[in-house]
Image (tube, rainbow, N blue to C red):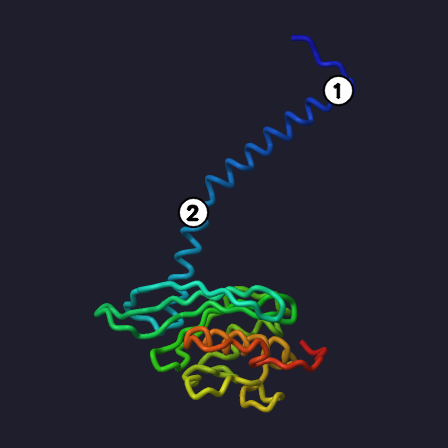
């Protein structure tokens, strides 16, 4: 077989051929791994829902996706309505997010049928390691800023103590705390089908802390 001459057209042909083959391989790999990734994500979400509702045998009876324009951008909330094994409605787990110190802070919050917070888990964050990243523990039942058991049906949103509320902020991470509480308040508003206040749980004040 005659060797290709090292001319510009031949080099272009070889590079294009390599790019096509490489692109095809990447597309194949992505297609092969897409379904397992979706399945894994589904399992993680299912465990998260069970966790924030309080464990036990539950059934996700219905899922609603709600889109709102907040803070100049489109925000998506997902409400996972939950029944017990007898078919009785016991609450919902709500996916909610807000802008934290380093980027989007996404959480899953569980509410009972009366509006009390059963639990939560942090699904995604870009907060400072060791500071804002403490949100996954700080607001749990044994945390310093615990919100577990708080009843939001009384119309009083969760507010950090620096803004006149009674929730202790994560040490040196007031911005993250505000973002977290805002996400929780918005989650409840969506769950209760109330108007979502874009500033709830937050403040317009500038703060350099994280």
Q: Nearer the viewer, residue 33 or 89?
A: 89
- Looking at the picture, how far across and down is residue 149, in whole percent? 41, 84
- 42 left or right, relative to 207: left
* Name of the residue lying farthest toward the left: 86
Q: Quadrant of the C terminus?
A: bottom right
Q: Nearer the viewer, residue 129 or 158?
A: 158
Q: How many marks?
A: 2
Q: Residue at x 71, y 14 (%)?
A: 4
Q: Is residue 93 above or below residue 23?
A: below
Q: Residue at x 49, y 87 (%)?
A: 156
Residue behind mark 2: 36
Residue 24: mark: none
Q: Nearer the viewer, mark 1 or mark 2?
A: 1
Residue behind mark 1: 9
- Local packing at callout 1 (Cα closer than 10 Å; few below 14, some 14-19, many 20+) is few
- 132 left or right, relative to 138: right
- The answer to which quarter of the image holds residue 190 is bottom left
């Amino acid at each position: 077989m005659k060797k290709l001459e090292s001319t510009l057209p031949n080099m272009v042909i070889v590079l294009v051929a390599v790019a096509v083959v490489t692109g095809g391989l990447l597309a194949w790999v992505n297609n092969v791994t897409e379904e397992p990734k979706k399945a894994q994500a589904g399992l993680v979400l299912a465990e998260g829902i069970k966790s924030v509702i309080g464990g036990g045998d539950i059934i996700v009876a219905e899922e609603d996706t709600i889109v709102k324009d907040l803070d100049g951008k489109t925000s998506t909330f997902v409400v996972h309505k939950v029944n017990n094994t007898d078919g009785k409605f016991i609450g919902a787990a709500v996916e909610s997010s807000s802008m934290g110190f380093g980027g989007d802070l996404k959480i899953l919050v569980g509410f009972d049928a009366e509006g009390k917070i059963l639990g939560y888990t942090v699904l995604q964050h870009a907060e400072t390691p060791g500071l804002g990243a403490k949100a996954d523990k700080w607001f749990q039942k044994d945390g310093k800023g615990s919100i577990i058991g708080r009843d939001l049906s009384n119309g009083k949103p969760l507010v950090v103590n620096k803004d006149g509320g009674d929730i202790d902020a994560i040490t040196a991470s007031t911005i993250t705390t505000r973002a977290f509480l805002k996400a929780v308040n918005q989650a409840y508003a969506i769950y209760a089908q109330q108007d979502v206040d874009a500033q709830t749980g937050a403040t317009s004040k500038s703060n350099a802390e994280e």
